[in-house]
Image: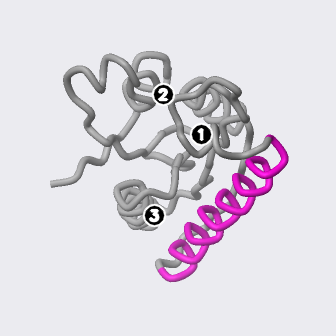
Amino acid sequence: MYKHFLVPTDGSALSNAAVKKAMEFARGMGAKVTVLTVVEPFKVLSINAEQLENTRAEFDRHADLVADKVLRDAEEVAAAIGTTCSALRMKSSDPAKAIVEVAASNDCDLIAMASHGREGFKAFMIGSVTMKVLANSKLPVLVYRES
């Protein structure tokens, strides 16, 4: 049914669990997987304390190292499960838009991702990348939630 999954990941524990489950599902379907991590650019004004404490060069260097590790970890999961996987990193200030665009440009037919399940004021203020992907994707989106 599905032949190519896009699996966005931010490297969090929940996202890593979703990567593993998506890889297992893809293997069962004989589908290939593209793993994506989106690195947000340095912002002078940010609610992310890490961005406020670093210079742009330090932030970029650190963000690249983290993205490389996130993708390397996903590739190791794919190898252990026996799934065909490619890794992709991109910079965008709008991760949801980047996810939808990458899925379309890579001929993916399913997006499989985690949801952190933010609620209330936090969801209103921060928003949810997953909710934005669900609202804007023309492809089916499989959402993994912590049980």
How far apart in space, not on screen, are marks 2 and 1 (Cα)? 8 Å
How far apart in space, not on screen, are marks 2 and 3 (Cα)? 18 Å
Which amino acid is tagged 1? Cys
Q: What numbered label is drawn on residue 108?
A: 1
* The C terminus: image quadrant: bottom left
Residue 132, magenta (yes or no): no
User: What is the image's colouring?
Assistant: one colour
- The residue located at (61%, 35%) in the rendering is 103
* Total tally of numbered discs in the picture: 3
- The residue located at (57%, 48%) in the rendering is 4
Where is residue 24 shown, x and y percent of the image?
A: 39, 67
Residue farthest along the front direction in this orientation: 53
Is 19 left, or right, of 102 in this rendering? left
Magenta region, residue range:
56-80
- The residue located at (71%, 46%) in the rendering is 54
Q: According to the image, label 2 marks what residue? A: 139
Instruction: Decide which of tag 2 and tag 1 comes sooner along the chain.
Output: 1
